[in-house]
Image (cartoon, rainbow, N blue to C red):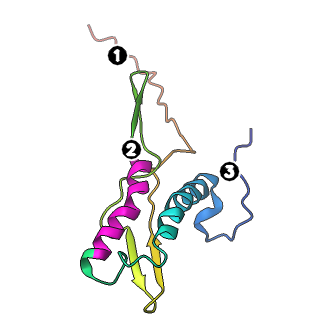
Amino acid sequence: MYWGDGNMLDTPASDYQVIEYLRLADKAARLVRPLLIRRVADRRLNSTPNSMAVNVNALMAPLRQMAKSVKFAGQVFPGEIESPKDGDIVLTWKSKTAVEAYIKLKPHNCPKDLTANIALDLSNDDSE
């Protein structure tokens, strides 16, 4: 029987050869994009330390939401990613009017190759 990931036609060293990782990155991009657009020409995003901290915290909200686990039918389902940590979002000023956001996501480990090792004990332990 053949099992495999969706063929993403990506380079061998890319992070996005696995469809699950691409979906997480796309979802984060869809959630963060409108937050960034709202900050265009908004002076509340400026180079002061307080402004940077407030905006990093605001941009981290979608990541925190993606990391939340859900309890359904008595079973806990983990979030889509691990909880974001300090430094997972970095805002960098490229010029007086250009800011770049760097965002790091960490997906949960999920097995795709499971191996069971079985030992057969045929010893005669008839000790009486």
Q: Secondary structure at mark 2?
A: loop
Marks 3, 2: nearer the viewer? 2
Viewer-nearest residue: 91 or 42: 42
| Quadrant of res 113 | top right
Vertical comparison of 12 with 75: above or below: below
Question: What residue is shown at x 48% (from left), y 69% (from top)?
Answer: 36
Name the N-terminal-most of marks 3 and 2. 3
Marks 1, 3: nearer the viewer? 3
Identify residue for label 3: 5
* x then y, percent, for residue 112: 57, 45
Distance from disc 3 to disc 2, alpha carbons, whole Å, reads 25 Å
In the image, is 87 to the left or to the right of 100? left
In the image, is 22 to the left or to the right of 98? right
Identify residue for label 1: 125
Viewer-nearest residue: 18 or 63: 63
Q: Which residues are magenta?
A: 51-68
Q: Residue furthest bottom?
A: 95
Q: Is residue 66 magenta?
A: yes
Distance from disc 1 to disc 3, alpha carbons, whole Å, reads 47 Å
Figure quadrant of the C terminus: top left
Distance from disc 1 to disc 2, alpha carbons, whole Å, reads 51 Å
Q: Secondary structure at mark 3?
A: loop
* x then y, percent, for residue 96: 43, 92
Viewer-nearest residue: 122 or 18: 18
Identify residue for label 2: 68
Question: What residue is shown at x 39% (from left), y 17% (from top)?
Answer: 124
Name the N-terminal-most of marks 1 and 2. 2
